[in-house]
Image (spheres, rainbow, N blue to C red):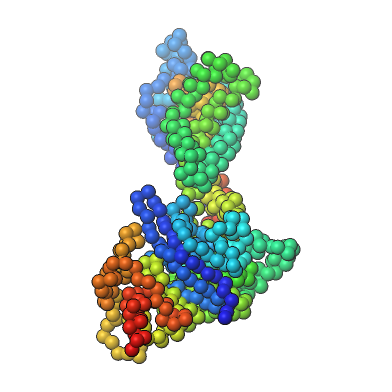
Amino acid sequence: MWKYVLKRLLLIIPILLGVVFIVFAIMSLTPSDPGRLILGISASQESVDQLNDQLGYNRPFMTRFLDYVKEAFLKFEFGNSYNSGKPVVREIMNNFPTTLKMVVISTVLYSIIGITLGVFSAVKQYSAGDNILRVASMAVAAFPQFWLAMMGILVFSLYLGWLPSNGIDNWKSWILPIGLYSLSASAPLLRLTRTIVLEQIRQDYVRTVRAKGAPEKRVIWKHVFKNSALPIINTVGVQFGASLGGMVVMESVYSLPGVGNLALTAMRQKDMPLIMGCTIFMAAIFCLMVLVVDIVSAYSDPRVKAKYAG
Amino acid sequence: MAEILLDIKDLVVEYKSELETVHAVNGINLRLNKRETLGIVGETGAGKTTTALSILRLLPDRVGHIAGGSVEFEGRDLLTLPESEMRAIRGEKISMIFQDPMTALDPIMTVGDQIKEALELHNHDNKSAEQIDRRVDEVLEMVGIPAYRRTEYPHQFSGGMKQRVVIAIALSCEPDLLIADEPTTALDVTIQAQVLSLMRRLKNDLDTSMLLITHDLGIVAQTCDTVAVMYAGYIIESGTIDDIFTGERHHPYTVGLFGSIPNLTVRAERLTPIDGLMPDPTKLPAGCPFAPRCPECRAECERGMPPVSEMSETHRICCWKYSSAEQKGDDGK
């Protein structure tokens, strides 16, 4: 098992190198002028050129790329943001707690809503409740997040005036972004859970359990749900990893200082070191979460566990 | 006269979908005495499994439903019992062995826990956890699996061993009636013999009655006391093992069934299968369901369902050939 984990951890390195290469290449292809960005429009062309030279911006692509990789992967040195002048790592770490708080709370929320309603929907297939849930989840899943976010502002901030529309002042500021994100993420999870549970409920082993005389509650939670849990954990885990890299839509609509918003601003300003830092951070945290999900599934499924034993 | 354990009367089962109604079981009568084995024979789709599932009321939700008749078990009609009482019967009084052991066990629960579950669900005399654990070991040893394998998962067992686990679950509470739905169909021939002899031995040791569903007449001959031959949801012939295997008079379908088995003692170039297919259960013919395939089909066969004719006290045939009018003629000779 440990050998497997180590192998997977080492595999993250080439993935990150690939990510760095792609982003680096794209950034080099777009016209940008870091010297001008740092010094501002009022600075003379000479001093801008001089700074560009100093930053090594005029060197060939491969030299700059290898230099960046050496600094980043060997010394964990990601440079300073062109815009604020602060180290990239500190910028990301300043923004991460906001994202983390949002992601953790909303993951718990939408998992509870999506999974319980999904199981209910499957167990009561074709009932009125199931029909309502199916239509509702389809509708919610069809609305784009940014639309939901703006409707939230329109209704709760503008008309009702109950909740703030941007920034973080107190606990109320979290309600709209977290609530709406959870709502929109619970819809696809509900549909997934319903499908998986329905597939399990038709399996032969369920009939065996019923033939033992087990009450329906036990059949569902002790057998059907346990067997359905694995693919659900997989989906939620991977989504958790993806959103830890920033909940871009919610953070930007509600102007929250999260990693997603940070990356978005960096991209708008062509803040190269910050863009690179954010991308590597998102990719690394995603890879780690996928690994965690794989380990969890290996431990909860005896069939998968047998494969990695020893 | 032996004591009656299970008495099925005029059982009608349908599978309904929005498009059509499948007439799976059409008013069958079955009787099983205590400590006896009743075999239900018939080809795929004859309604054997549906009959078995109806007894336990485990027909698929929504689609399958019992449209009429009664299933009396120890004098009580199972079809009118509330669900909670039915649950108390499942696994304790009546248990079932399923056709495919590969899929009949929960893949992420150890076999020991799966047996334990049945014991815990019917733990009336408040046995302690240790007593139940000991019983799990006992049951495993009983079906020929070493007790230390209780912590293993189904994927670590072979098909035959899995079926032993299924049997262990079914027999853990020492039921009065064991329903075995083609218990050996999915197994290798050598394993089939082992599993069958195990089932026969355990049935005798535990004083259990058995309802054995199969399409294998050889298994019936070895195992059963009485036999019912099913065709298109009807029981077309029933009787003791002697009535069916050695009797003179048979339903043409039964004759056809025996004609389809290879016989080692008689030299024959080829088998004589029954021509044609079973009728579509969504639109059964008005007359005898076997009429379209029957070599002895006559005019009245297509007009109406033949009545049941009693050949002897135990032997019944449902065919116009033996209908009362003709029998009177026979008696007159």
| Residue for point 56% across, 41% down | A116
Residue for point 48% across, 71% down? B30
Look at the image and tell me in which quarter the C terminus of chain A lies: bottom right
Q: Position of residue A257 (x, y in %)?
A: 56, 23
Tell me where residue A215 appears, x and y as whole percent: 60, 54
- Who is closer to the viewer here, A101 or B163? B163
The image position of residue A245, as x and y in percent, is 52, 33
Please state which of residues A278 and B168 is positioned toward the viewer in this rendering: B168
Residue A115 appears in the rendering: no
The answer to whether A208 is drawn above or below residue A114 in the figure is below
Left or right position of B258 against B1 = left
Q: Is residue A216 visible?
A: yes
Count of residue discs: 0
| Front residue (pair A134, B207) | B207
Percent of width and height locating residue A151: 48, 21
Relative placement, left or right, of B207 versus A236 is right
> In percent of the image, x 66 and y 62: which residue is there?
B122
